[in-house]
Every structure is written in structure tokens, then in C-alpha cells.
Image (tube, rainbow, N blue to C red):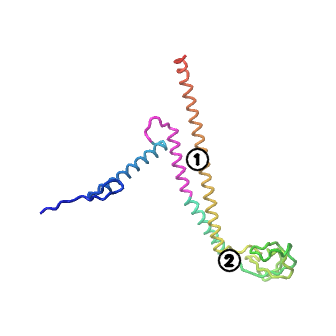
Amino acid sequence: MTMKVVPCRRRMSSGWCTCGHESDAREVGMTESRLRRWVRLTARRLGLSRNPLCRTSDRMEGLLVVATLLAAVIAVPVAISVGRSAYADGRQTSASQAASGHWDTARLLERAPGSMAGQDSSNPPTTLARARWQGANGASTEGDVPVRAGSPAGSSVRVWVDAHGQVTRPPLTNSQLSDKGVATAITTLMGLELAVVVSSLLARWLLERRRLAAWGAEWERVAPRWSRKYH
């Protein structure tokens, strides 16, 4: 006894579906057709087609577009690498500073210039004032240290002292180093992308000048023959 295969009669968006998957094959064929059409259109716009009307300058402009896109994409990992390098260098410098320096307490010898107003804010104003602290060899050292504006004489200030006994900036924290690395990467990316855009515009301008010069030379060669033909 033989069995008869009855095709499925479900209605699909692109036609009647059968057990032979005709609808799926039709969808795949339409997708491939659209892809080929998009590839041909892109190649034509980039000057990569075999059209005899496509000039050398058109092909060069198409290659310029491709090179610009590639350069813009390559700039992203380059900027990330620069940011990571800045972060690594900062960590090395901070580790070296932390190993050779230490926190110390300095005592102000004078009242710090400025007003005490705004001292309760998260970022109070700072200034420099004369202070005394213990140097590298235990000797007393004097100099200017950063303090809050308006701090009275005799008040204590926490300062970072390096291996030479001088007050310097403390090592950057991991959060500050991360911010510095991100800022370096963003700045590098913006600079590279700006250079890519400016270079692309300059190259397109030079190509346009060359195209106009070639058109003018061709017109000078053809114009006399047209003038003799119609006059």
C-alpha cells in the first residue's frame, strides 16, 4: 500500500507553503537577490564597477571612501591602546611615588590668604601658605603647602613628602588613574578621527580639482571641432 503525500496548504507571507519548503527557498532567493543588488550598487557608488563611463578619479574617490572608513575603525583600538598605556604608566609612577614618599603633618606659620566662605562645599577653595614639617633627615623644613583658604596660623595640614623631604602632589588613586586613562583614550580618538576627516576632505578637494582640470582640458580639445561643425 502506497501513501500519497498531500502538500501543506498553509498560507505564508510569500506564497503557499508545501512540504518541499518552497516558501523558505523563495525567501532565501529574495534575500540573496537583495544582497547582490546592494553589492552591485555599493560597488558602482565606490567606482569599482566596469562601467566605461567611470573615470580614474571616480575609482580613486571610491578607494578614498574605503580607506577613510577603515582608518576611522582602526582609530578605535589605537585610542584604547593609548588609554591603557597611559593607565599602566600612571600606575607605575604612582607605585614609585608611594614607595619613596609618605604622608606627614605640616603646621602653618601664617594665616592662609583668602576667606573661609565656602569651606563647607565639596570642593573648597585652596591656596598656598607658609608651613613647617619634618624633612627627610628629621630636620625641620619650611615651604609653601596647599591649604584651604583662610586657614588660621598654627593649624595642621596633611601633606605628602617625597624622598627629598619636599612637599609634592600625592600619588594618584586607582579611580583617578582610570579617569586619566579614559580621558586619554577619548582625546586620542577625537584627535585621530579629526585627522581622518580632515585628510579625507583634503584628498577629495584635490581629486575634484584634478577632475575639473581634466574636464577643462578635454573641453578645450573638443570645443574647436564643435565650433567648426555648427558654424
Q: Secondary structure at mark 1?
A: helix
User: Is residue 143 depicted above or below 1 in this figure?
Assistant: below
Residue position marked by numbered label 2 in the rendering:
98
Quick check: 128 left or right of 200?
A: right
Q: Considering depth in this image, is 121 or 141 the residue closer to the camera?
A: 121
- Looking at the picture, does residue 175 appear above or below residue 219? below
The image's mark for residue 62 is: none
Label 1 neighbour load within 10 Å: few <14, some 14-19, many 20+: some
User: Would you say residue 64 sits in the magenta stretch?
Assistant: yes
**Element under label 2?**
helix
Foreground of the two, 3 or 169: 3
Residue 94 is situated, as x and y percent measured from the top left of the image, at 66, 73
Q: Residue at x 61, y 52 (%)?
A: 195
Which stretch did the figure color magenta? 49-75
Which residue is label 1 attached to? 200
Figure check: 70 above or below 49: below
Of the pair 156 and 22, the residue shown nearer to us: 22
Mark 2: give few (<14), some (14-19) or many (20+) Cα within 10 Å. some
State the image coordinates of residue 81 (x, y, percent, origin top left). Answer: 57, 63
| Rendered location of residue 79, percent (x, y) | 58, 60
Q: Residue 139 at x, y = what percent?
A: 81, 82
Q: Quadrant of residue 132?
A: bottom right
Q: Amino acid at mark 1?
A: Ser
Q: Earlier in the sequence, mark 1 or mark 2?
A: 2
Q: Within the image, what quadrant is residue 43 found in?
A: top left
Q: Which three-letter amino acid code belongs to the residue tagged 2?
A: Ala
Q: Main secondary structure of the magenta part?
A: helix
- Quarter of the image for the C terminus: give it: top right
**Front residue of 156 and 143:** 156
Looking at the image, residue 58 lies above or below residue 178: above
Magenta-colored stretch includes residue 101: no
